[in-house]
Image (spheres, rainbow, N blue to C red):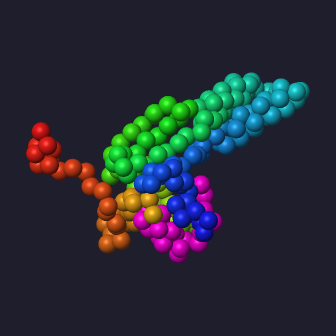
């Protein structure tokens, strides 16, 4: 973060930020696939087969393979302040595009005790895991949102710590544009 002030993004040009990432189901699919292949091989080689569970292993292999194949392409998130939108590319094809008020940095509370807080970017996008203490997580989230000029939301729905930089157009504003 000291080398790149816009981490986890790279500055492509002024006011255009790009983040490359893989979907988090990539490693989950690889793990399920590997475990089911190994489990299936050991299951079929064992001589004490009382019931047929081979369907379970075949189903696990298919699910793991589907997760692996659907997640293996690198994704590119482009935040373009010059155009006022964000874009998500998969395999160099535009997959999703929307206005800047739909993408934001949010501090989320976790149910497990090991990591009580985590940072989320946009609905469903997660930056690479950061080794940060929970008490520094809010500072980091606000810093990322400030550097990328994005909205920031605290983990509480009603909070005085929200920072709104982009708003959706109001109904009356849309009527004036027409």
Whether 131 is among the magenta residues is: yes
- Tell me the quadrant of the picture where the C terminus can be found: top left
Work out whether residue 80 or residue 45 is closer to the camera in this orientation and state it: 80
Question: Residue 75: x percent and y percent?
Answer: 55, 40
Whether 64 is among the magenta residues is: no
Work out whether residue 111 or residue 121 is closer to the camera in this orientation and state it: 121
Q: Residue at x 51, y 54 (%)?
A: 11
- The segment highlighted magenta reads 126-146
Work out whether residue 76 or residue 158 is closer to the camera in this orientation and state it: 76
In the rendered view, tell whether residue 151 sits above or below residue 95: below
Question: Residue 138: x percent and y percent?
Answer: 47, 70
Is residue 67 something that shows in the picture?
no
Q: Residue at x 34, y 48 (%)?
A: 84
Question: Residue 13: x percent and y percent?
Answer: 48, 51
Q: Quadrant of residue 115?
A: bottom right
Question: Residue 74: x percent and y percent?
Answer: 59, 39
- Tell me the quadrant of the picture where the N terminus can be found: bottom right
Q: Which residue is drawn at 45% across and 54% down?
A: 14
Q: Quadrant of residue 53?
A: top right
């Amino acid at each position: 973060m000291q080398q790149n002030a816009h981490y986890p993004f790279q500055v492509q040009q002024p006011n255009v930020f790009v983040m490359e990432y893989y979907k988090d189901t990539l490693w989950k699919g690889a793990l399920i696939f590997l475990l089911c292949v190994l489990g299936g091989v050991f299951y079929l080689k064992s001589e004490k087969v009382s019931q047929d569970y081979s369907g379970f292993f075949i189903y696990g292999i298919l699910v793991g393979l589907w997760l692996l194949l659907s997640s293996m392409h690198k994704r590119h998130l482009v935040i373009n302040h010059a155009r006022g939108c964000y874009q998500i590319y998969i395999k160099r094809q535009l997959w999703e595009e929307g206005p800047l008020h739909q993408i934001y940095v949010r501090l989320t509370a976790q149910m497990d005790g090991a990591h009580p807080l985590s940072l989320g970017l946009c609905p469903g996008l997660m930056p690479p895991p950061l080794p940060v203490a929970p008490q520094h997580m809010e500072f980091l989230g606000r810093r990322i949102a400030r550097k990328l000029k994005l909205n920031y939301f605290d983990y509480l729905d009603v909070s005085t710590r929200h920072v709104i930089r982009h708003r959706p157009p109001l109904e009356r504003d849309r009527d004036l544009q027409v």
